[in-house]
Image (tube, helix red, strand yellow):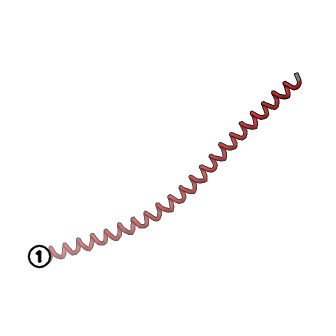
Amino acid sequence: MESILRAVKLIKDIVKNKIQREKLCRLNSKVKQMRTYKKSAKHNTELNIKNLRIHSHLRFFYRTAADKKLRKNTLNIKTTL
């Protein structure tokens, strides 16, 4: 009888340890995911800032080019009139 109780207790301990290990593994994987997400989010924001800078620069360049063209056209119109 005593050996059966001991065996049951041993099985309970094993199951408990296994459950704890699984919980720990899940927690670790979540932490890893969060870390990678943070890293990728940081990287993405850096890229976005870079792209925004380039984009705004290009927009400025095209705007000035368009203004020049417009000015040129208005000058041409004035001279023809």
Give x and y (percent) for residue 65: 29, 72
* 42 or 80: nearer the viewer: 42
* 40 or 54: nearer the viewer: 40
Secondary structure state at the residue bearing disc 1: helix
* 30 or 9: nearer the viewer: 9
Q: Is residue 3 above or below residue 51?
A: above
Give x and y (percent) for residue 73: 19, 73
What's the residue at 39%, 66% (across, down)?
56
What's the residue at 66%, 47% (across, down)?
28
* 61 or 5: nearer the viewer: 5
State the image quarter where residue 75 is shown.
bottom left
Q: Is residue 65 left or right of residue 22?
A: left
Please tell me how many numbered marks the rendered image carries.
1
Q: In which quadrant will I find the C terminus?
A: bottom left
Name the outermost residue toward the top.
1
State the image quarter where residue 8 is shown.
top right
Give x and y (percent) for residue 16: 75, 34
Q: In which quadrant will I find the N terminus?
A: top right
Classed neighbour count for the residue bearing mark 1: other residues with Cα under 10 Å, few (<14), some (14–19), many (≥20)? few
Q: Is residue 14 above or below residue 56?
A: above
Q: Is residue 19 left or right of residue 54?
A: right
Name the outermost residue toward the left.
81
Q: What residue type is disc 1 on?
A: Thr
Q: Which residue bears the numbered disc 1?
A: 80
Name the outermost residue toward the right.
2
Give x and y (percent) for residue 48: 46, 60
What's the residue at 78%, 30% (across, down)?
12
